[in-house]
Image (tube, rainbow, N blue to C red):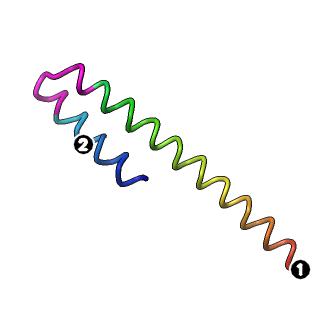
Amino acid sequence: MLKWALIFLVISLVAGFLGFRGVSSAAATVAKVLFAIALILFLIFVVLAFMAGSAAL
């Protein structure tokens, strides 16, 4: 998921550099959403790992 976020970030930067503002803003929005989803999933898995670790004690 982070890989796709980075790909869309690069697309956004290149499109912005070339002057395609619509494509750039759309790709930036997709990159932000994918990064947010990846961050939320990461936090969920960290919490689950701590809960599983404390249950084993």
Q: Which mark is residue 28?
A: none
For disc 1, the marked residue is 57
Is tag 2's residue or tag 1's residue first in the polypeptide sequence? 2
User: Answer yes or no: do the residues labelled 2 and 1 have beta carbons within 8 Å?
Assistant: no
Q: Which mark is residue 10?
A: 2
In the rendered image, the vertical position of residue 54 relative to residue 9, given as above or below: below
Q: Few, some or many C-alpha atoms within 10 Å of disc 1 (few <14, some 14-19, many ≥20)?
A: few
Residue 11 image position (x, y, % from top left):
22, 39
Residue 18 image position (x, y, % from top left):
10, 27
Q: Tell me the magenta residue range.
A: 15-24
Q: Is residue 56 one of those drawn in magenta? A: no
Which amino acid, mark 2? Val
Examine the image and state in which quarter residue 50 appears: bottom right
Q: Is residue 19 one of those drawn in magenta? A: yes
In the rendered image, the vertical position of residue 37 relative to residue 30, given as above or below: below
Residue 40 image position (x, y, % from top left):
60, 47
Alpha carbons under labels 2 and 1: distance apart: 45 Å
On screen, residue 52 versus residue 9, left or right, reads: right
